[in-house]
Image: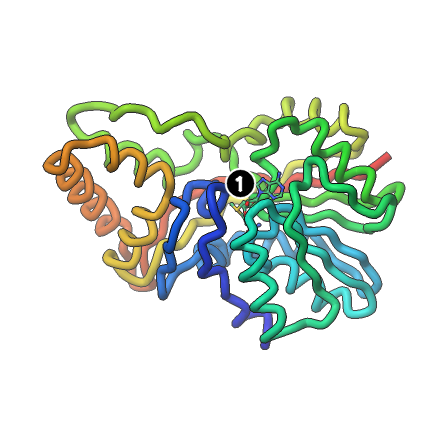
Amino acid sequence: MTDASDNSAQATPGRHEGTAVRRAAGGHTPGTSGYDAELRRHNQMLRRVCDVRLHDRVLDIGCGTGQTTRQAARTARAGSALGVDVSATAIERAREVARAQGPGNVTFEHADAQVHRFPQEHFDLAISRFGTMFFDDPVAAFANIGLALRPAGRLVMMVWQTHERNEWDVTIHRSLAGPEGPVAAASAGPDPFSLADPPTVKRILGAAGFADITFTDVHEPVYYGPDVAAALDWVRGFTCTSEVLKRLEPAAAARAVGRLRETLSAHLSDDGVWFDSRAWIITARRH
Ligand SMILES: C[S@@+](CC[C@H](N)C(=O)[O-])C[C@H]1O[C@@H](n2cnc3c(N)ncnc32)[C@H](O)[C@@H]1O
C-alpha cells in the first residue's frame, strides 16, 4: 500500500474526531470523503516539516485512525511509530488497517496522552495532526509528552488557527444560524481552536519544558467531498452541526439543512467541495 492510497480514516473515533473535533459520535462513514481526504493538502505540508528520519522513534499524539502514524513508520524503516488516542474506536480501526496494510513497525495504544505513562526519553519525535488541542490541562499534557521525548527531541503539531480565519467554521455556523441569528450554542466541549494563539502556545509549551518554538502558517483548503450530497453528509456529521440541528424544531432544522446545502453548492468546483482554512504547524524542542 502506498502512502498516497493510505486513506482509511473512515471510522467514527468518538467525541474528539473530525474537522477540529467536530464529528458526531456514532456511525459516520462518508464513502468518498473522510478525514484523511479532507486534510490531504495539509498532510503534505505536515509531512515535510515532520521530516521523519530512517532511525526515528515517533510518537503520534491523538492519532485517530492512524494515517500519519503509518506514514511516519514507513519513513522510519529502521525505527518505529506508536500512535495513541483516547478513542477506542479509532485505535481499533487504526490497528485493523495496520494489520491489513502494514507497516510492521507501527503500533497503536488506547491512551490519554495527557497522563499516559510513556517510556521515558524514548522518542525522537512527537507528531500530531490536529490531535493536541483537546487536553484538559495542556501544560501537564505537553510536560508528559516531553518526558517521553529524548533530550532535544522534537515536537511537530498541526493545529487550527482562530475560528475567524477558518472559512469552513465561520460558514457552517453562519449557514446554520440563518436570518434568525445564532442558534443556541452547542454544549461546551473540547475547543478545536485552543492552540490558535501563538503567545498562549508559547506560554504553554515553555511551561511544559519546550524551547525553540516556531509557527508556520498553513493556508490550504479542506476538502468535504466530491459533490454536494457527499459534502452535506460529511458536514452533518460534525458535532457542531448535529448539535445545532438537534436543538431546532423540525421545520427550522430542515431550513438550516437547506441553507447548508446552498453554501456547499457555492463551494463546489470541478474537483469537489472545498473551503478555505488556516492552520499552524508548531515546532518545538524538548530542553
Ligand atoms: C481531530 S482528530 C485528529 C485525528 C488524527 N490525528 C488525524 O489527523 O486523523 C483529534 C484526535 O485527538 C484525539 N484526542 C483528543 N484528546 C486526546 C488525548 N488527551 N489523548 C489522546 N488522544 C486524544 C481524539 O480522540 C481524536 O482522534
Q: Observer-nearest residue: 264 or 144?
A: 144
Locate residue 56 relative to residue 226 in the image: left or right: right
Residue drawn at point x = 25 percent, y = 36 percent: 246
Viewer-side residue, 247 vs 127: 247
- From the viewer's perspective, tell me whether residue 145 is left or right of residue 181: right
Q: Where is residue 204 in the image (x, y as percent from the top left)?
A: 69, 25
Q: Residue furthest left?
A: 251
Around disc 1, counting alpha carbons within 10 Å, would you say few (fewer than 14), some (14 to 19), or many (20 or more)? many
Q: Which residue is drawn at 45% across and 47% down?
A: 18
In the rendered image, residue 35, in percent from the top left (x then y), is placed at 46, 55
Of the pair 116 and 245, the residue shown nearer to us: 116
Indicate the quadrant of ligand 1 in the picture.
top right
Q: Does the residue labelled 1 lie within 8 Å of ligand 1?
A: no
Residue 33 located left or right of residue 105: left
Asked if 208 appears above or below 245 in the picture, the reply is: above
Q: How is the image coloured?
A: rainbow
- Name the residue located 81 percent from the left edge and 65 percent from the top edge: 54
Q: What residue would you read off at disc 1?
A: 279
Pinpoint residue 238: horizontal percent, then vertical percent.
37, 44
Q: In this view, does 245 lie above or below 203?
A: below
The secondary element bearing badge 1 is classed as strand
The residue located at (54%, 62%) in the rendering is 93
Q: What residue type is labelled 1?
A: Ala
Q: What is the tally of numbered marks visible in this picture?
A: 1
Residue 250 occupies which quadrant of the picture?
A: top left
Q: Quadrant of the C terminus?
A: top right
Quadrant where the image shows the N terminus: bottom right
